[in-house]
Image: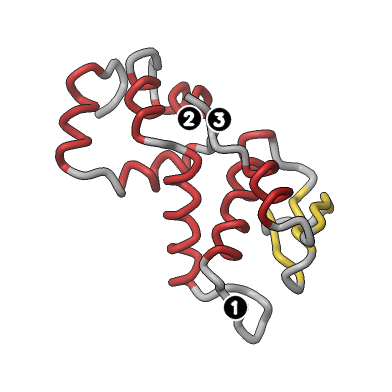
Amino acid sequence: MQMYDPLEDLSVRYPQVTLATAAIRPAHAALVGGCLLLVDASLDARQRRCSIAHEIAHLDLAHTATGNRAFARRQEVEADRLASTRLISFEQLREAVRWCTDERDLAEQLQVSEQALSIRRTLLSAEEISDLHAGARCYG
């Protein structure tokens, strides 16, 4: 089962967007003018993967920045949800919970941040939750 690769997705679907790293804390990433995606240079690989997926979600959802060049809170939530479902398929989650020892380990195995994992968990149906509990070592 292949994991979602936001770098590949960006290059294939948005070749006009240039990816660059810079010191932009406290932000993790930012879209500038729809043609530049800045990622904070201090992020680890999992955070970078999640941040790029989040910004791609803004592009896919045709979000527009507000007056201060930031996205509205509602748009941030929508982008978080779309990114987390792309980054963590249910099948990948089901497989990973069988091997993990705790939530941190689960996020690491899925190559996502703990925040992305938490968001993805909120989107599970009751049936999916039941399915996960059946064979999980760390899903609670």
What secondary structure is marked by label 1?
Answer: loop
In the image, residue 42 lies at what x, y percent? 76, 42
Q: What amino acid type should be assigned to the residue bearing mark 3?
A: Gln
Rate crowding at label 1 as few (under 14), some (14 to 19) or many (20 or more) other CA atoms within 10 Å: some
Q: Indicate left or right for 27 with 103 as reference.
A: right
Q: Secondary structure at mark 2?
A: helix
Nearer to us in this view, 47 or 59: 59
In this picture, residue 81 sits left or right of residue 10: left
Question: Mark 1 touching mark 2, by CB under 8 A?
Answer: no
Task: Please state the horizontal and vertical placement of residue 98, each as a whole percent of the image.
Answer: 33, 15
Of the residues under marks 3 and 1, which one precedes in the sequence? 1
Tell me the kind of residue under disc 2.
Answer: Ala
Mark-to-mark CA distance, 1 and 2 = 30 Å
Could you tell me how far apart the alpha carbons at marks 3 and 2 are, in whole angstroms? Answer: 6 Å
* Point 73% across, 49% down: residue: 11
Residue 100 drawn above or below residue 16: above
The residue drawn where x is 68% and y is 34% is 45
For label 2, the residue is 107
- Label at residue 64: 1
Residue 108: x and y, percent? 53, 25
Q: Is residue 87 above or below residue 69?
A: above
Q: Amino acid at mark 1?
A: Thr
Q: Mark 2 and mark 3 in contact (Cβ < 8 Å)?
A: no
Category of crowding for the residue at label 2, using alpha-carbon neighbours closer than 10 angstroms: few (below 14), some (14–19), many (at least 20): many
Residue at which label 3 appears: 111
Q: Is residue 54 above or below residue 136?
A: below
